[in-house]
Image (cartoon, rainbow, N blue to C red):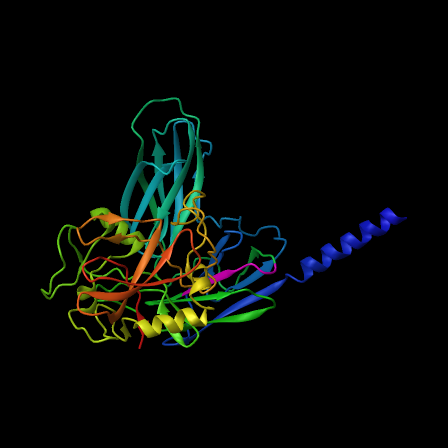
Amino acid sequence: MKKSTIIVIFLVSFFLKIQAQDYLISFAGSGDTNVVNTVKVENLTSRDTVTLNGSDILHLSATVGIGSPDRDNGALKVYPNPMAEQSTLTFVSSESGNAVICVVDLSGKTVCQTSALLSRGVHSFHVSGINRGMYFVKVSGKNYFHSIKLTSQSMVQSDARIEYVSSVENIPGKQLKSSAATIDMLYTNGDQLLFKGISGIYRTVVPDVPTSSKTITFNFAACTDDDNNNYFIVQTGTQNWMAENLNVGVRINGNQNQTNNGIIEKYCYDNNDSNCTVYGGLYQWNETMQYDTTSGSKGICPSGWHLPTDAEWTSFTTFLGGDTVAGGKVKSTGTIETGTSLWYSPNTGATNESGFTAFPAGSRSENGMFDNAGLGGNWWCSSAWFTYAAWFRGLNYNYSNVHRYVAGINVGFSVRCLRD
């Protein structure tokens, strides 16, 4: 009798747990437009993702019904896996732009890599020539990052390569799925979700931990730089920040200083253009400010945005609980070792509950050398500290705090802009 009672209590508890995680999420737009074209949902806890139309309903549940999408939503697949001599890599590019596709071994060494200018839609590549072993296949675009494990059973000794196969273009504005569908997603109470809404040139991130059915409203505002790149934005308290690093300008080599020549210049880590696609550009302070030393200047930011002051950065980290914990709340989650992030392990404290999604872009030193990609990231303030130095904020892979320091104006750091 006691055993039966325990089983009944367990079943009731399990049923109630499932029922408590049965939420319906709809979407709306506000601000510059009330139209929501597509929404990408990232579960930062489980690493699941799903992409749906703005008119669809997201069904969050501890159990997923028959006919629902698989756990990776088809964002990145490799088949066959394990691979004999060749496999086909298929992934979804959420918008047009340059993408970097690479295969890395378990030590982090790149086995082969290619880049391609892709349209929005589904793309396929062949992967071949990889020796027997375990690898990670990684795809990085302007607003997406996919990774999957690949096992090779090939005993053939040949050059590893990635070759383009085909594309199925998704015309902007065209629905990715049937209209007004209900899309299932696995969810456990307490999971941190990021909702990424897109409407034309507008992109907004909303972080949330749902505890009931609700409507997620994206407050859309234009954030378009001089190269017509459109950026995701996120609201933190009363501030609206770029949710990705600025990537505007013409690349110059790291051994050159950026100059006041009427052209926005940037560094790409290791002088590799594809790293700007992944990390954004690196800029010296004067170039960032466009040679205006006024704190809070527009600098190289998009119209309607400006370079945050030291005080505005402090307001940001204070809202997130102070410098000692804010670092974890702004860092993108996951690690390079698991193929789920750009940060090296342990990526201490990373939850990204703010939606800021800070990447470890490293830096360019005053002598023109690049270092620390994967280990840390640094972002300029528009507040000078005497003549040859300025304030910045830094994050590190093995700390959960935000560092407030000064640096010489000739180093190259990342840039995030703040809405006016």
Any part of residue 196 in sight: no
Q: Quadrant of residue 280?
A: bottom left
Decide which of 397, 352 is in the foreground and name it.
397
286 up-or-down from 2: above or below: below
User: What percent of the width, then of the height, locates residue 99?
Assistant: 31, 49
Any part of residue 24 in sight: yes
Residue 358 is a magenta residue: no
Q: Residue at x 46, y 48 (%)?
A: 74
Task: Decide if residue 3 is on the left or right side of residue 183.
Answer: right
Q: Residue at x 56, y 56 (%)?
A: 185
Q: Residue at x 34, y 61 (%)?
A: 244
Residue 194 is a magenta residue: yes
Q: Which residues are magenta?
A: 189-197
Decide which of 168, 102 is in the foreground and name it.
102
User: What percent of the width, then of the height, locates residue 199?
Assistant: 38, 67
Q: Quadrant of the C terminus?
A: bottom left
